[in-house]
Image: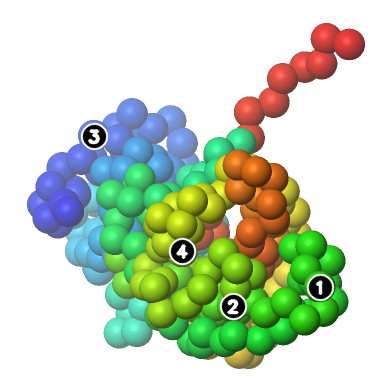
């Protein structure tokens, strides 16, 4: 993690490279470039507006405008006590099937989970249809808040047939590690995504304002024998994930 002196040293170099832009845009883009490159890690606390303005030789209005733009873009977030920190953000290719823990570890952060509930019950009609279950089959419903370096990133509800997960007590941080040990590691998945806004309950969990933008996904996973083994609904905090996919032009 940078010290403030190292931060200013690097920031001045990047700012010089972007000297053709208006000052507030140049400052905003410089900070964003440092975040996107991984030079500034999630949770890094920026110096105060006064210190930024005095050290960089710009007005506090310039600093305030740049920070406001980055907060709106979810690059930065404001914490209690007026601290401004780098938001947790994970880049994830949609062409790769990976667990939340793997995504977070690949970014050099510590994955975590705050358990909300582990319930053994019958699947809903929608879940039974997706997971090819009968009305009497039991599932484990696992609800938890997923974190990166302690920062809330997503609310997750995973449903796994009991035949593939005899006991949810085995699951701590990574569900996929447990499924792999039983020979049912997800091999492929179907996923759909849609935009939404957070209600008061979800907003409290994700530490965002009610009505803030969130991204929902539903993923149905299959093992190597093509058995549907997991149905997971995830609600991502707005701006916490960058999803991307490589596209190819059809030759047909």
Instruction: Identify the residue under disc 2.
Output: 140
Instruction: Identify the residue under disc 3.
Output: 13
Marks 2 and 1: which is nearer the front? 1
- Give above or below for 12 relative to 183: above
Q: Give me the disc on residue 175.
A: 4
Q: In the rendered view, does 168 fall on the left or right side of 50?
A: right
Q: CA distance from mark 1 to mark 3?
A: 63 Å
Q: Residue at x 60, y 73 (%)?
A: 162
Instruction: Describe the element under mark 1 as helix, strand or loop.
Output: loop
Marks 1 and 3: which is nearer the front? 1
Instruction: Identify the residue under disc 1.
Output: 134
Badge 4: how crowded within 10 Å, few (<14), some, or many (20+)? many
- Give above or below for 13 relative to 64: above
Q: Residue furthest top?
A: 251
Q: Can you tell which quarter of the image residue 42 is in?
A: bottom left
Instruction: Describe the element under mark 4 as helix, strand or loop.
Output: helix
Q: CA distance from mark 3 to mark 2?
A: 53 Å
Q: In x, y percent, where is residue 220? A: 69, 56
Q: Give me the disc on residue 150.
A: none
Instruction: Describe the element under mark 3 as helix, strand or loop.
Output: helix
Q: CA distance from mark 4 to mark 3?
A: 43 Å
Q: Nearer the viewer, residue 179 or 105?
A: 179
């Amino acid at each position: 993690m940078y010290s403030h002196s190292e931060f200013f040293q690097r920031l001045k170099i990047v700012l010089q490279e972007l000297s053709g832009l208006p000052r507030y845009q140049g400052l905003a883009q410089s900070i964003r470039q440092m975040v996107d490159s991984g030079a500034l890690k999630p949770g890094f606390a920026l110096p105060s507006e006064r210190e930024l303005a005095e050290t960089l030789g710009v007005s506090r209005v310039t600093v305030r405008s740049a920070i406001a733009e980055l907060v709106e873009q979810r690059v930065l977030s404001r914490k209690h006590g007026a601290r401004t920190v780098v938001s947790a953000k994970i880049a994830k290719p949609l062409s790769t099937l990976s667990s939340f823990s793997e995504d977070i570890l690949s970014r050099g952060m510590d994955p975590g989970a705050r358990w909300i509930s582990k319930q053994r019950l019958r699947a809903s009609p929608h879940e039974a249809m997706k997971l090819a279950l009968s009305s009497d089959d039991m599932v484990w419903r696992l609800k938890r808040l997923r974190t990166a370096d302690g920062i809330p990133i997503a609310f997750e509800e995973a449903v796994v047939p009991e035949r593939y997960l005899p006991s949810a007590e085995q699951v701590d941080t990574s569900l996929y590690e447990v499924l792999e040990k039983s020979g049912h590691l997800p091999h492929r998945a179907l996923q759909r995504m849609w935009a939404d806004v957070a209600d008061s309950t979800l907003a409290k969990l994700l530490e965002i304002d009610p009505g803030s933008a969130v991204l929902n996904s539903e993923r149905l996973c299959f093992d190597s024998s093509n058995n549907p083994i997991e149905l997971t609904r995830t609600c991502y905090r707005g701006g916490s994930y960058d999803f991307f996919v490589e596209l190819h032009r059809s030759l047909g």
